[in-house]
Image (spheres, coloured by chain):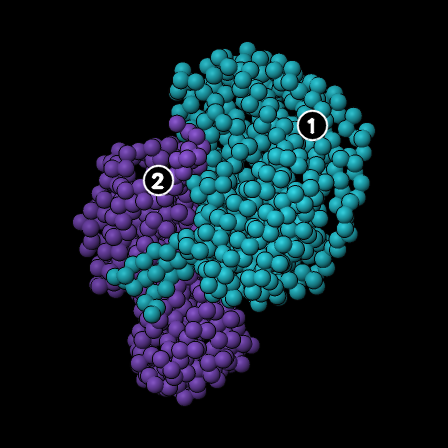
Chain colours: A cyan, B purple
């Protein structure tokens, strides 16, 4: 298997092997070699590994960012070489910090009853499967799930995403160097590049594997979740979200153009390939919606095509656009240029926006409210604030959602807040949800089907480490 | 449906209806009426309800304990009227306390990034299904899951256990009186008495239901867990555990008789009908095992039969005894008296203990290491400490486990601790696991298949309330 340059469609870099069932089993077997070691190692040894790994990544900043840029077509600067790489470093160093100060253990004592409660590692490896869209900060071998799993002292078995295997291999070289320098067992971090789906499921069933950290598509997430559920193994699956933005009537009437500008910037950011992309903008009032449409047309009509991460992303966003077009969704921009996509050889898509009314959105709920990775957005023009609330009530679980409201919209805003608190892991006032700060108070999670469990967050320590722990009470233990 | 007096087998008390599918759907529909109210009510209103409910239970101490005694045959005093009733009161008052001080919200703030993270209710009802063995303290309408669900401000839809419907109905009367006195919506707490399994599954799928709290058999738990898993709804299922006790060689050699006494008391406590009953005693050294057997025979040979909770408990423990006998497990006591069980009309069982060697326990792992509710215990005589550790390594997930070791067993003890920390939710030194203190530092949980998720505890607040929450981040929300 080789990576593909998304700009040209040409294969690039090394040839990577697909792991066999036997090779995956060997990874599972080996994990046991690291379980006790990691559970018992001095804080400084694990923290030192994470710090050193971060330092090695930092020293290779340009090389890694360049490689990731070639494989993903994401901008070299500031996105990869600055923003994402710095986030990766920060996460690794945060993980080192919570290992060093034991914050992830969340100890509770009851001395009167001689009880000590704490979080401990799971006793097996965490299989860490990262997404296409963050080759560094959510990479299975360097990203958020990796940091959380190691912070909770679990071995990691990472799967490289086929979209950035060279970047992953290079990160893994740094990881291995840091691992060996720290004197950790080889099985502390293991990597494979791809496997047959049924072999991946067999790996999850291996007794050396205790949990799954997955970020990716709903289809893959649901399959892996079902395997873990049947086995009773904790899974953390971040799967899909449309992260709708609700624009109340007064806000829409008073400042539709600037709201549109913020939304447009957010849906094309990173090529629209963010799990927190606000794919649907619900606007109360037809005049406000018309103004948004006008602004969208003005800004995006002459936009250059965006190079997408992979052929699969292109195919999926194309299918989403086709689905809306076939159902008669009126296009605001981009739709008529779909034919131009494949002319270049790479994976391209013009920013595409539809605008539908409430009746259409209700009738074709799936087409409108299903995540489409890529620069696709849907405006839903609703009659007024009551309809806005109706849509909020019927929403599936989301990672994030935004309320845009003026002082005169106070009642609508309060009602939306009270509905959306049960629907999304994060609620924003005004701000678009694409920025996810790495903070102990962040929630990157949400009710099903955004994730498989609304009680956890994939970003922010120590919260995200909890996903990969078990609770233990030492009862009158000396 | 009527309850049965387990001592006589005669039907007692009121006739209770089986809920129809439509009635269950009405419970789900109604839940929405309470969701926002409970989420937004002043702390004092919810806490006041819990306090008042506790006071009403306390005022009816004798009546409730008497009713529970008639339906379960558990001792009136001290078990029901003192120990279990006091535990029930304590749990309700603890729940009131964490509502009053917001401890369950576990707020984290990041003022620099304007982020506030907190736990919030789930936005739907918690279906609360309690077990047979604690008619008060784990009752769906007054017990641990009820307290946890209400503490996290969720409506509750409770199912009465068929073994103590009259007790449940009487508890519910107090609950309704307290609910109405506090001005909470009727749908804050709803109760049904029984349903067809497929209708229960439909209730879990109802959009007004957000989560499940279940304590009971593995078979029922696995079925309900599968329903919740497919729907992405949080489930807390406490299912089964044999809670093995490991006796290291020096401890066995020096004090086998007193270890035996502690174990015997623990396996017959409450008729052996505790989820933390130590069903298996692994003893290193044949001489120590022989001494334990001798003591067991001495203490239990002339024991009176124990009245079990229900016909189903009797049938299951009978089947477990038969399974061991058919496989040739040597009986120490009780086995030969099985024929006497049914002579009385009630649900009886003589304390029964088998003693097997390591080879038998390995060959017939399922028969030895499967939970059998009732006064049944299995001694596993292993050759030495190495075999003890081998059995620890091959253990399934457990609620609790005990290590009995002398100073001279320090190495074995350390090895067992390091293996068992990944296998059980709670580890005890010396003490038998049947006592589960209600404390914020308690863990009543454990890896699958003891429960469905090793990251939670069903006992102790605020930890147990977390099971019935979602995480929410308010991001730059005024």
With A408 as the anchor, is A69 left or right in this view? Answer: right
Res A347 seen here: yes
Who is closer to the viewer here, A302 or B158? A302
Q: Report the quarter where the C terminus of chain B lies.
A: top left
Q: Position of residue B70 (x, y in %)?
A: 27, 59
- Mark 2 or 1: in front is 1
Measured as percent of width and height from the top left, residue B1 is found at 38, 51
**B284 vs A34: above or below:** below
How crowded is the residue under tag 2: few (<14 C-alpha within 10 Å), some, or many (20+)?
many
Dot 1: element: helix
Between A286 and B434, the one nearer to me in the picture = A286
- Residue depicted at x 65% and y 15%: A298
Apparent side of residue B431 relative to residue A419 in the rendered image (left or right) = left
Q: Which structural element holds mark 2? A: loop
- Res B235 visible: no
In front of the other: A463 or B12: A463
In the rendered image, residue B170, in percent from the top left (x then y), is placed at 27, 48
Which chain's residue wears label 1?
Answer: A
The front one of B24 and B370 is: B370
Q: Residue at x 64, y 48 (%)?
A: A60
- Residue A195 has which mark? none
Residue B153 - label: 2
Q: Are marks 2 and 1 on the same chain?
A: no
According to the image, label 1 marks what residue? A321
Q: Classify mark 1: residues with Cα within 10 Å, few (<14), some (14-19) or many (20+).
A: many
On the image, which quarter does residue A184 sit in? bottom right
Q: Residue at x 50, y 61 (%)?
A: A45
């Amino acid at each position: 298997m080789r990576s593909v340059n998304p700009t040209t469609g040409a294969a690039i870099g090394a040839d990577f092997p697909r792991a066999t069932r036997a090779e995956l089993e060997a990874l599972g077997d080996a994990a046991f070699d690291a379980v006790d070691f990691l559970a018992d190692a001095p804080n400084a040894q694990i923290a030192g590994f994470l710090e050193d790994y971060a330092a090695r990544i930092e020293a290779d900043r340009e090389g890694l960012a360049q490689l990731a840029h070639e494989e993903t077509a994401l901008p070299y600067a500031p996105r990869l070489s600055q923003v994402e790489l710095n986030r990766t470093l920060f996460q690794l160093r945060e993980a080192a910090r919570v290992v060093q100060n034991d914050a992830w253990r969340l100890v509770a004592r009851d001395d009167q009853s001689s009880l000590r409660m704490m979080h401990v590692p799971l006793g097996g490896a965490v299989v860490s499967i990262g997404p296409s869209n963050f080759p560094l900060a959510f990479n299975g071998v360097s990203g958020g799930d990796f940091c959380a799993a190691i912070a909770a002292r679990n071995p990691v078995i990472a799967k490289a995403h086929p979209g950035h295997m060279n970047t992953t291999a290079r990160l893994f070289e740094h990881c291995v160097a840091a691992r060996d320098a720290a004197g950790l067992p080889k099985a502390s971090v293991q990597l494979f590049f791809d496997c047959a789906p049924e072999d991946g499921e067999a790996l999850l069933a291996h007794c050396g594997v205790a949990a799954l950290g997955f970020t990716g598509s709903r289809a893959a997430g649901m399959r892996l979740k079902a395997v873990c559920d049947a086995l009773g193994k904790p899974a953390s699956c971040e799967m899909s979200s449309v992260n709708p933005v609700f624009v109340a009537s007064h806000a829409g009437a008073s400042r539709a153009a600037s709201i549109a500008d913020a939304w447009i910037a957010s849906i094309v950011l990173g090529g629209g390939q963010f799990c927190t992309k606000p794919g649907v903008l619900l606007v109360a009032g037809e005049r406000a919606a018309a103004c948004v449409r006008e602004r969208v047309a003005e800004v995006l009509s002459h936009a250059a095509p965006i190079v997408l991460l992979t052929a699969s992303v292109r195919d999926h966003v194309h299918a989403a656009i086709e689905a809306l077009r076939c159902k008669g969704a009126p296009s605001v921009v981009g739709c008529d240029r779909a034919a131009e996509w494949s002319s270049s050889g790479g994976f391209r898509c013009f920013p595409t926006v539809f605008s539908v009314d409430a009746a259409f959105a209700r009738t074709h709920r799936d087409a409108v409210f299903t995540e489409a990775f890529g620069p696709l957005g849907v405006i839903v023009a609703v009659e007024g604030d009551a309809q806005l609330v109706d849509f909020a009530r019927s929403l599936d679980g989301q990672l994030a959602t935004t309320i845009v409201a003026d002082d005169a919209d106070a009642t609508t805003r309060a009602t939306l807040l009270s509905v959306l608190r049960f629907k999304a892991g994060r609620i924003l006032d005004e701000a678009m949800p694409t920025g996810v700060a790495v903070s102990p108070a962040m929630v990157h999670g949400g009710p099903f089907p955004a994730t498989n469990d609304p009680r956890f967050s994939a970003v922010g320590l120590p919260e995200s480490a909890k996903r990969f722990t078990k609770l233990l009470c030492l009862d009158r233990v000396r």
